[in-house]
Amino acid sequence: MRRSDAFRAVRRFYRRIVLIRALVAAAAVFVAYPVLAAAPVQTLYVSGWLGFDGSVAWPAQMFPNQVPAITDLSPKYVTAGKPGVTLTLTGNFFNTGSSAFWNGSSRPTQYVSATQVLVSISAGDIANPGTNQVIVNNPGAPVSNSQTVAVVPLPTVGGFKGLGPFTPLDATLQLDAQGAAQIQWVLLPLTPGVSVVQDRALSSSIPAGAQTITTQSPALSLSTLNLSPGQCQIQAIAYNLAGDSAPPAAANTTFVTDDLSAVRVYPNPWRSDKDGDIPVTFDRLPLNITIKVFDVSGRWVKELTTPGASATWDLTNESGQRVASGIYLYLIQDSQGQKRTGKMVIIK
């Protein structure tokens, strides 16, 4: 055997003897202090120590001066004005003596494990918006790295911008909202005569038939939503980064098309024994429509104009006289020159 090989063999033997002695000493500690055997453990990573590479689990109390490290905390965002919050700090080398600090001032800290502590933050700490630093200190050791908690205001909502009684189906809705990270839109089709919800507190459940859309900005394009013309209630809820919401904005509008393809005329036929005083209704109209009614001989009977999405004919002519039974023709024309014709039957 060469001298170098013999030297390496002796060195390996010596290392094993030292390691065995260290393990025996550790076992003696567990026997002398059985509380350590049941204590939370901390994983230590060892490389090149007595020829050993890997991890070893030791009671965390045996390393009280180890520098703690915060790898994550929750929540990262808190709404200003809340009564208080408990932070969950995740990391390494926490012990029963660990103390958390909020902007340099200690706060009540509950030890959970060597990798987790809970920190109580008071209402006064989060009374105003701002950025705050959280650190952890173990007795006799340097402080940990810092993590940030942002205190954010509750969003403020002023209503819808430029929303009128009629809204084109290709329009973009705009919400006047400040401090919002996310907007939830609720579009609920209405039957005629239904008014907007007066209660500012939106139900946690979405009404049946409603369509919900979430956007990151206070704007919603309607062009891709495949909506139908007609009355609709619009509700918008603004959330901040902490997930808290302001009271919702709510309003009614009537969605209108930009063409004549969806126009409806009813009742048709109109029957005096069934419909009585009910007028003939033209709905799902674009804005600024003119409707002309003629008899079958082409004589002009009535002209209707409407700035909105519907119009009604009370079955009278331009002189105010009731028309007779028969077939009548109508011509609908919008401000762009688009036209649509059709016929209706009046039976008395």
Image: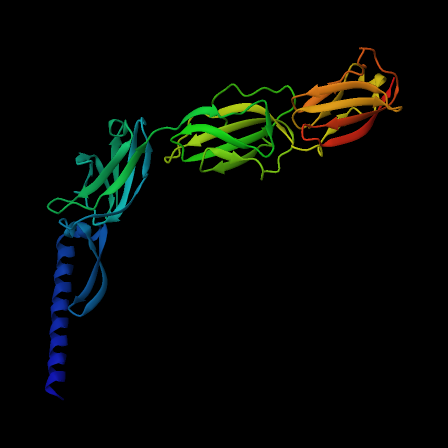
Quadrant in the picture for residue 295? top right
- The residue sitting at 15% across, 64% down in the picture is 23
Task: Determine whether, in the image, residue 259 is placed left or right of residue 295.
Answer: left
Q: Is residue 206 visible?
A: no
Residue 145 showing in the rendered view: yes
Give whichever of 221, 28 is nearer the camera: 221
Q: Quadrant of residue 48?
A: bottom left
Q: Nearer the viewer, residue 129 or 244?
A: 129
Which residue is found at the position 43% from the left and 35% from the top? 182
Side (left or right) of 96 relative to 223: left
x, y (%) of residue 80? 31, 28
Q: State the image coordinates of residue 211 (x, y, percent, origin top left).
A: 57, 34
Q: Is residue 316 above or below residue 50?
A: above
In the displayed structure, would residue 28 be above or below residue 255?
A: below
Whether residue 225 is situated above or below residue 346 in the rendered picture: below
Position of residue 42 measured from the top left corner of the image (x, y, whole percent): 22, 53
Looking at the rendered image, the quarter that the N terminus falls into is bottom left
Q: In what quadrant of the picture does the C terminus appear?
A: top right
Residue depicted at 52% across the width and 31% down the height: 173
Q: Position of residue 133 (x, y in %)?
A: 23, 38
Q: Residue at x 11, y 66 (%)?
A: 21
Report the number of discs.
0
